[in-house]
Image (tube, grey):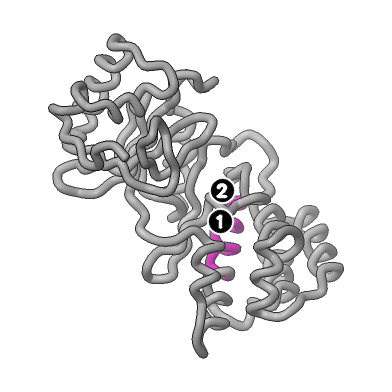
Amino acid sequence: MLQSKVTFDSLRKVKNARVLCYPRYTTEEMDKRLQELEKLGIEVIEFTGQKQVYNTLVLGKGHVGIVVTAYRKGEKVALKIRRVDSDRLSMEHEARMLEKANRNGIGPRLLGITPNFLLMEYIEGALLPEWIKTLKGKDAKKRLHQVLRLILEQAWKLDKAGLDHGELNQAPKHIIIKLDDAPCLVDFETASDSRQTSNVTSICQYLFIGGSISNMVQRKLGKIDKGNLLNALRTYKEKRDRKSFEKILTRCGIDIFKA
């Protein structure tokens, strides 16, 4: 693997800095992006994580951007880099969606924005599926109950705010459980405040009804009646009120623990 920590002054010289212009590097594009990084106050970029780009470790790789670790004023932060071939002309939309989520106490804090970069709070923790696998001991069930309740409450807040995340029906990469067991919803690049929200229904489908994660949850908590849950979800889609949301919590078997 290539060099891990690279100072701002060295970014032009090291090969893995080409990640900043993935997948088409030009000196002109690099010059423009370095100016933006300087504006954001980035001092160091650290290439580490579970994904790879150009034989370089990164935190995440998607259709719109690459996420890496960076440092600003000595603080560890997350930096999302707009891919050169992205169909997004800038990071402005995602920044606006994240800012709206932040106003409702959701998501990593937005720290800065330029056309090609989104600077966010770095969230230390594990993705939800990996976190569930680590649960052991007599308090494992209670911890899972509490985390699932907090996730659903965040989905409810987003529905109330009129902000649809857009990818919670398949969310293995979009929920990070922090070291204090607080869940954080991440990646608002496909979020929208103009379409019908479906955060609660989508996350329930993911957590309790379909796929490997629902099997993991039910092995830890016990089986639920999916038919009753689907009925509760249909009622919620019609009424979208707190009473119908709390009925969902009951059907999921997590209403007995307060968030």
With 72 as the anchor, is 80 left or right in this view? right
Q: Provide the secondary structure element on which disc 1 rests.
A: helix
* Residue 116 position (above or below residue 259): above
Q: Are marks 2 and 1 in contact (CB under 8 Å)?
A: yes
Q: Quadrant of residue 156?
A: bottom right
Q: Residue at x 39, y 39 (%)?
A: 67
Q: Amino acid at mark 2?
A: Ala
Q: Amino acid at mark 1?
A: Lys
Badge number at residue 196 = none
Between 218 and 18, the one nearer to me in the picture:
18
Query: How busy is the neighbourhood of tag 1: few (under 14 within 10 Å), some, or many (20 plus)?
Result: some
Q: Residue at x 15, y 28 (%)?
A: 10
- In this rendering, the count of numbered labels is 2
Pinpoint residue 69: horizontal percent, then vertical percent.
30, 43
Q: CA distance from mark 2 to mark 1?
A: 6 Å
Q: Residue at x 81, y 60 (%)?
A: 235
The span picked out in magenta is: 149-160
